[in-house]
Amino acid sequence: MEEVSVPGAMGTSASFALRLGQTVFASASLLFMSFRVEFYGYSSFCYLVVVMGLVIPWSTTLALVDAYSILLKYVPRQPKIMWVVIIGDWVLSFLSLAAACSTAGVIDLLLDTGQPYCPVKLCRRYQMSAATAFLSWFLSFASSLFNLWLLPSL
Amino acid sequence: MEEVSVPGAMGTSASFALRLGQTVFASASLLFMSFRVEFYGYSSFCYLVVVMGLVIPWSTTLALVDAYSILLKYVPRQPKIMWVVIIGDWVLSFLSLAAACSTAGVIDLLLDTGQPYCPVKLCRRYQMSAATAFLSWFLSFASSLFNLWLLPSL
């Protein structure tokens, strides 16, 4: 198997950085949303928590695979594995975009209705959570695109 | 230029059907949202209206291009044009997913708060609008994927 190097594709250090970024942002989003906040009152927020709970193990696993590939200089790039990775990234990036958008929509509505539903401190947390979810979406979309780019050359 | 036929790629009748579907669903979403409904009270709903207002002319234009290609049996498949089409589809599909999700999140919250904010008849309309926006997203995502598939062979 010849070695093709697309920066950001599985097994490169750029991919490791992307995966690490996804894990960090998804964890931040989860923490902002679930720590001392009554998120279960709104179904969008519950959805965000569920999706981020899926993104974290997925990205952590792939970050470990990347770290292993970099250290041992062996890249497990069978087309079948790549397909699984690409489709997984794809689905998770759509889910996290959907979660971030619905959360953002709800926050905007809560900000409009004002004080009783949304104390300033709580709403700031919700906003941070939505923003980090957007960043996590962006990074997993980038990973998915880089891996898709690599696919025809395998 | 050799003729490659990926069903659903630009210039085929499947692509024409997809474009027509996008136009129909986006128009339905826009009508459900803007006809006798005070959509400008919620920023998510305004966003949905704006995005659907972008999807309709885009899909109509490409449907006309497809109809022209089918009738005259000439397909304008320069890679540059394909790139523009793919990136446009991509961006619009993300925008419409985002709009549909934020609308769905807001509707869910309105349904929870109940009667004064969301009379049954109005909320049904909002739901129909979000559902048709999701369908329109799905079709433009499919178009984009088919065209991307064609690209390496050009």
Image: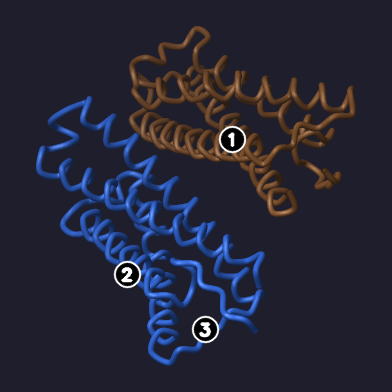
Chain colours: A blue, B brown
State the residue position of label 3.
A75
Q: Nearer the viewer, residue A53 or B8?
A: B8
Return the mark for residue A20.
2
C-alpha separation, residue under disc 2 versus residue under disc 3: 18 Å
Return the mark for residue B132.
none
Amino acid type, callout 1:
Val
- Chain containing the residue with disc 3: A
Q: Nearer the viewer, mark 2 or mark 1?
A: 1
- Chain containing the residue with disc 2: A
C-alpha separation, residue under disc 1 versus residue under disc 3: 34 Å
Disc 3: CA contacts within 10 A as few (<14), some (14-19) or many (>=20) = some
Is B143 positioned to the left or the right of B137 in the image?
right
Q: Nearer the viewer, mark 2 or mark 3?
A: 3
| Image point (33%, 69%), residue name | A17
Q: Earlier in the sequence, mark 2 or mark 3?
A: 2
Amino acid type, callout 2:
Leu
The part of the image, by quadrant, that contains residue A53 is bottom left
Is A97 positioned to the left or the right of B138 in the image?
left
State the residue position of label 1.
B84
Residue B97: x percent and y percent?
50, 38
Work out whether A136 lies above or below A151: above
Residue B15: x percent and y percent?
77, 35
Q: Are marks 2 and 1 on the same chain?
A: no
